[in-house]
Amino acid sequence: MFLTLPRLAPTVPTSYVFGGVSERCTRLALAMAEEGVIRADDVSAFKAPLAAASLREVVQKAWQREVGHRLNFTTLSTYATLVLGDDSYGYSDEAQSKETVEIRFSAAAPQELFAERTIMALENHHPDLGRYALSTLDRALSIFDVPLTPEGAFHMAQHIYWQGEDNEDEVVAQCEAEGVSTEDIVRRDVLFDGVPPWAYDFSQKPKDQVDTMKAESVIDTISDPVLGSFLTHIVALDKYLDLAHENDLMPQTQDDEDDWGECVEFMANLRWREDDSLGRVYDDHYNYAVQGETRDGMAFMRFPANQEGLRSGLARLNAVVNIFASLDRALNIIKGY
């Protein structure tokens, strides 16, 4: 097979003979060269013919320089993998797999963080400012599925324990009607003991609506520089989330034709405080999920392996990286506050 790239420099060969490399990788290499992501000095050290391993090395080096270095986080367990082989998630068309670049988002074991101190400091500074910050964190952490957060725990509890209701009342009533013991039914007031309802119950209405503009105006009034920095990152995160949703830049979590199943990978484990009961809900959710179909990885992003596709794909990836970076900075402050 021959791969012809645009001439990068007089001394750089334009045709390479290789084998054992995927069609996806060769198409991506061509698009990266056309778009200027692969530079002349990336290949100037190689002599024709360029082998498959060398081509992959060139692609990986250029990709790392372009976006890879921005996907290293301090607190988030999230990472992204550029798929250079032809294997992929859920493709029904083999040709589409080879002609499309795929980026897979995954996560390692998430760090355990406790939000109460940081969130309550904001809440005490201005009514519902803490709620705004926590809701923004929830928006970001729920990109790929129900997150490990107080609000995520409430969703999990509704699904696992209460037949979709807000509490155990319906389950208790049904058990009593059937003469079944209610002793082992999980109680809402036990699970969320000490956690303010607005921190987990999405039906709780704020007393004083705080939006991005209001939160931004409050930053300069905070005397604690660390707390001020935290709110700055929250506001940036909120804006990046709005931008990504408005422009349809978010990653996909399933194919139209193929539901992956439930996600059991998480970017962060955000509890309220160390002695809360949210960890139990997270564990029970995991044990419930793994009895059914689960997916390997959190999400994916795909774009055509051509110049125009690469350009739009990098714009989408940049939007997601901005979200992750702001989220990571905010969570890092929670970890140390």
Image: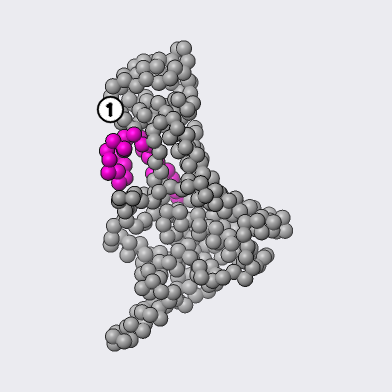
Rendered residue at 40%/66% (across/down): 156
From the viewer's perspective, is residue 299 above or below residue 112?
Answer: above
Quarter of the rendering occupied by the C terminus = bottom right
Left or right? Give the position of 157 relative to 213: left
Given residues 233 and 251, the one toward you in this image is 251
Residue 163, quarter of picture: bottom left
Rendered residue at 47%/15% (across/down): 9
Q: How are the colours assigned in the image? A: one colour
Q: Amino acid at mark 1?
A: Gly
Quarter of the rendering occupied by the N terminus = top left
Left or right? Give the position of 196 relative to 58: right
Residue 4 visible in the displayed image: yes
Rendered residue at 53%/57% (across/down): 137
Find residue 37 and report its horizontal and vertical position in percent.
Answer: 48, 28
Disc tally is: 1
Find residue 246 and report its horizontal and vertical position in percent.
Answer: 52, 49
Determine which residue is flagged by label 1.
20
Find residue 310 and report its horizontal and vertical position in percent.
Answer: 44, 34
From the viewer's perspective, is residue 184 above or below residue 262?
Answer: below
Residue 106 visible in the displayed image: no
Q: Is residue 40 magenta?
A: no
From the viewer's perspective, is residue 294 above or below residue 128?
Answer: above
Rendered residue at 39%/54% (across/down): 265
The magenta segment? 77-104
Q: Which class describes the residues within 10 Å of circle 1: few (<14), some (14-19), or many (20+)?
A: few
Give the structural element (helix, strand or loop) at label 1: loop
Left or right? Give the position of 107 relative to 336: left
Find residue 259 and report its horizontal and vertical position in percent.
Answer: 31, 53
From the viewer's perspective, is residue 73 above or below residue 131?
Answer: above
